[in-house]
Amino acid sequence: MTTDFALATRDTQLTSDLCIKCNICTSACPVAAVTDLFPGPKVVGPQAQRFREPGAVSLDHAVEYCSGCGVCSLVCPHGVQIAEMNVIAKAGMAERDGLPLRNRILGRSELVGKLGSFFAPLSNLPIQNKFLRGIGERLLGISRQAAFPRFARQRFRTWFARSGADRDAAGVYKVVYFHGCSTNYYEPRVGQAAVRVLRHNGCKVSIAEQNCCGLPMQSNGEFAAARAYAEANLRKLAPYVREGYVIVGTSTSCTLTFKHEYRTVLGIQSEEADLVAGATYDFFEFLEKLDAEGLLNTRFRRLSHRIVYHAPCQFRTHAVGRPAADLLRRIPGATVRETTADCCGVAGTYGLKAEKYQIAKDVGRKAFDEIRDAQPARIACDSETCRWWLAQHTGLPAAHPVEILAEAYGL
Amino acid sequence: MTAQASYDTVVVGAGLAGMFAGALAARRGARTLVIAQGVGGTHVGPGTIDVWGYEPHPPTPSPDGKSRRERGGLATNPQAELEKLEAPQHPLRLAGLPALREALTEFQNICEAAGYPLAGTLDRNFFLPTALGAIRPACLAPESFIAGDVRQPGDLALARLPGFRDFFADLAAANLSAAGHPTCVVALDLPHAPTRRDSPGGATDLARLFDDGNYRAEVANHWRDALKGVARLGLPAILGLESAAAARRDLSDKLGVGLFEIPILPPSVPGMRLFNILRDAIHEAGGRVTIGPRVTGWVDANAGHVHGVIAETAGGPRRYAARSIILATGGFRHGGLDAPAKGQVKEPVFDLPVSTGEAWFAPLYWDAHPYARFGVRVNAEGMQPVSANGKVIFPNLFAIGGLLAGADRNGEGSREGIDLATAWVAVGQIPTSKSQTPTQTDV
């Protein structure tokens, strides 16, 4: 660990001093509730932090079992950044002990996406092949049971380039859309719906050159590589913000990374980081803003549809309410129920790891049960990894809420 | 500056006062947002509704010659104490007895509907054992507490759960016995007790286990023989989180023993139950609860009213407009009052004037400390904060709960009574929009 890194993340780590050990975080932790392997956020967070300040590496490998869902930081009444502290501790251990190849693969969603979509549909075969997945589990520790999405044959960016220019060149808002890896390589339909919905509401839409947001690397312990992605994205996005664009994304973990992780976890302190964080909106957060300004088109077709909305843990950390559920409710004929579960379990790449697969499944049980009980036509959820996980474990289709909204607009 | 979203009512603070106000407002049809930095006082409280617990005690001279105010004896009848209360600025006097009574009834209705009935009436306190074996008066208590009332017939027994760190039955039993309530201890093993790796699990872990009927059946078989001859058994408050009332009844029936719970160290399982009930009530009525961001006021000083609040979200400030704002941020311990420097007291959200005094502390720790009465002064009509000369500061701003001046909530045992009554009065003042669409439609 370099001195710079320790310094840059010091403010986050020092919030351990605000902890009064009330254990509210432990009682809210979805992982601690289902496994004895994780002693809880207080123990591995602010309590352990006192043994590794300043910049010392954690002595306690139990922090590996933190899924990073962030519920602890939200419920803490005293402002301790527990989840953030845990990610930093994990990275410190990775630097000391080295990382398994598995984590390096799971962290490289951009590289995997590039290769996979280049060779699609051939590249889908090993992912669906039970024998190869069994080998993958034994060699790498990637759970053979966890569902992976299929690579798309046409990338989102290719579609966008062919989708034609905006009708209204000025636009009520200039939006630079951040699609992220999942939309580009796996689910271009999410980005297509997003662009159509933005244009339908009079926004001028651009897409910037962009990299992976870096979150998968950050959560898998590769801070240096994540920081390189972060710097690249900041360099590419900041000029748009200076020209008056807002950054809008459909992958809620990517937008959270711009807003929060770059500064709080990776310790990037720069004017560009503040600029990008301040101009970033998660998709429905942006639509809510349009609505408050009287700019949102609310003429919807009837959509007799039973929907269960699950607010992903990473969306909760945005701390902006549930604008997607609020808007879907305004579609005539749509009935929307929300899950009360704090986390579906998968938490990005956590549930994909063989030793954590069962824990993640146990965490998700409440969400799975609530969804199955409601028997919706579709699950709506703003995070791709949650959608894939929920669909796998409930057997029900899952969509980004913007896909449903696009249908309600008749787009 | 434009708003991110607009609400009829924004409640700041997610303790008992804020959550109850949120539930009441949402049920009245107001588009409601409860927003708070972290969860509130429910998780550190005992889960009872204390209205007035102690008789007034005349000032007595302290060893150094200064006047002291000790805590008085246990009050048997909260209503009678309130009728005698000579403190016109006390929040319960401002709210008034009728509002208090209605608030308690409504709170009981909400809990009853959630399958977690609270027993009690305003004219009688329960005398419940604490985890240390003292006696604590409570006006309303969950059904699962009341068999512990020391005035009920039958000797008490307390469960010693080996390995569970947060309840020392022997200490509690010794203290209760010494106070004239004969209490014995029964050692009861928990079958496959949860652990946190190398240490025993906490109350929340156990409560989740007791939600499970199969586990209760296993416990009952395990404990039956050891409980022969026991009339009523006290356990730490761990008997279920999601289905607590049913869990306690079921285990009690299976064992043929009256069971009662004793609140223990935070995080409080009975407090979490109340929080969850109110959260669900808010959601069912179409309201929102956002836990996480720190909040400051959004004030238009020229217009003479409050626009709403500014939430420090992950990306930066987001403005939420509201027709009415209810401030329920608590006192010093909950961040509603701040003492940035010696002698200074600030209210951090709207920078409201705080009523203070020269003296902060009484000579002895357990005495009534003057600082406990510091807080925001409000009017009786609507819990609107007022300046030192009694003038309403913002017509659409209301303050409730532990933030208010004039009460020593611990010393009086009046905490939850103040929370519920002041929330009731404030919500009674807020206008609701007529033409709003429901935000929550259940399948």
Image (tube, coloured by chain):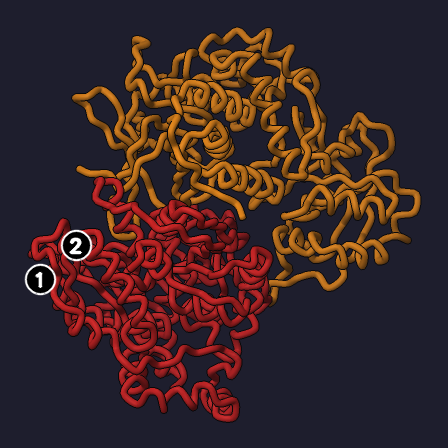
B362 in relation to B310, above or below:
above
Q: Residue at x 46, y 55 (%)?
A: A305
Density class for disc 2 (Cα within 10 Å; few <14, some 14-19, many ≥20) is many
- Figure chain in red: A
Q: Which mark is residue A239?
A: 1
Image quarter of residue B307: top left
What's the distance in space between the residues labelled 2 and 1, CA to CA?
18 Å
- Check disc 2 and report its element: helix, strand or loop: loop
Q: Is residue B338 left or right of residue B106?
A: left
- Figure chain in orange: B
Image quarter of residue B344: top left
Front label number (2 vs 1): 2
Residue B101 position, x and y percent, is 60, 17
| Circle 2 chain | A
The quarter of the rendered structure image containing the N terminus of chain A is bottom left
A320 in relation to A142, above or below:
above
The quarter of the rendered structure image containing the C terminus of chain A is bottom left
Residue B331: tell me if it is visible: no
B437 in relation to B352, above or below:
below
Q: Where does label 2 land, which residue?
A: A203
Residue A410: tell me if it is visible: yes
Disc 1 marks a residue whose amino acid type is: Pro
